[in-house]
Image: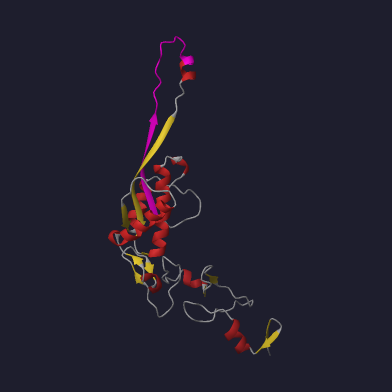
Amino acid sequence: MFSIHNAAPFHPHCHRERFWPKCVVCGSFIPARPDGRVEYSENPFWGSKHCRGHLADGTPRCYSCDRLQPRGDEYVALQDGRHVCYTCLGTIVVDTADCQPLYSEVLAFYALVEMPLPVKPPLMLVETSGLNEAEAGEGANRGQGPVFHTRGLCLSEVTHHISPVYHDGSPFLWSVMRRRQLVPRTSASVTAILVLFGMPRLLTGSVLAHELMHAWLKMAGCAVAAFPSP
């Protein structure tokens, strides 16, 4: 009895060893269903395969790279409940002071592409709970759309300026309104940039760059309502 793969015969044991999907978490061959089909989940970036049951059995997942913890390894648990694998742990940014050199690099990049920020917003690295509270305070509402993990937030204060209309003595009010339109103007000041702590340097930098683009657009007065945060 042989198993066929690409028209080539293999001994069943050899075929299993070479081609059968193996779970990256438990290290076992992923079992087949009674109908012969093999069902598993696969990380689209890493290409790693794992039994579907590990998604609900409490197996830790690295918050940064999304890889599940293999048996025998132990991911580091952060104080807000997230987990970090040892690969990502080597470059994580731990607090606000630790992030300042990276913050300066991202600001320098904006200046290099001729988009300098007129004011350097305060930067704070926070826990998940702090970020969620700030997001709720900003009035973020995702409705029924997909659920995303918030990793950064640009906090701002929006001011609406309305120019008054002055009467010039004409008895016809409509003539005044036609000559002087009531044009509202909106401006925004960025009060802080919040970024989740405990992420690798590369991921932290990308989140910083994203939030600073929100800040730049708001400081430049570019349609504040059209560019919600985060």
Queried whether the magenta region covers residue 35, the answer comes back as no
Q: Of 2 and 47, which appears nearest the observer?
A: 47
Q: Is residue 35 above or below residue 171?
A: below
Residue appearing at x 37%, y 54% in the figure: 107
Give residue 63's position: percent from left, percent from top. 41, 65
Queried whether the magenta region covers residue 168, the answer comes back as yes
Q: Of 17 and 121, which appears nearest the observer?
A: 121
Give residue 116's position: percent from left, percent from top. 39, 48
> Which residue range is magenta in the image?
152-175
Query: For the image shown, how many numbered marks are present on the structure?
Result: 0
Give residue 86's position: percent from left, percent from top. 38, 74
User: Is residue 78 in view from this perspective?
Assistant: yes
Q: Quadrant of residue 42?
A: bottom right
User: Is residue 230 in view from this perspective?
Assistant: no
Instruction: Locate the N terminus by quadrant.
Output: bottom right
Q: Is residue 28 above or below residue 156?
A: below
Give residue 66's position: percent from left, percent from top. 45, 67
Q: How is the image coloured?
A: secondary structure
Q: Of 50 and 228, which appears nearest the observer?
A: 228
Q: Of 188 and 52, which appears nearest the observer?
A: 188
Q: Quadrant of residue 210?
A: bottom left
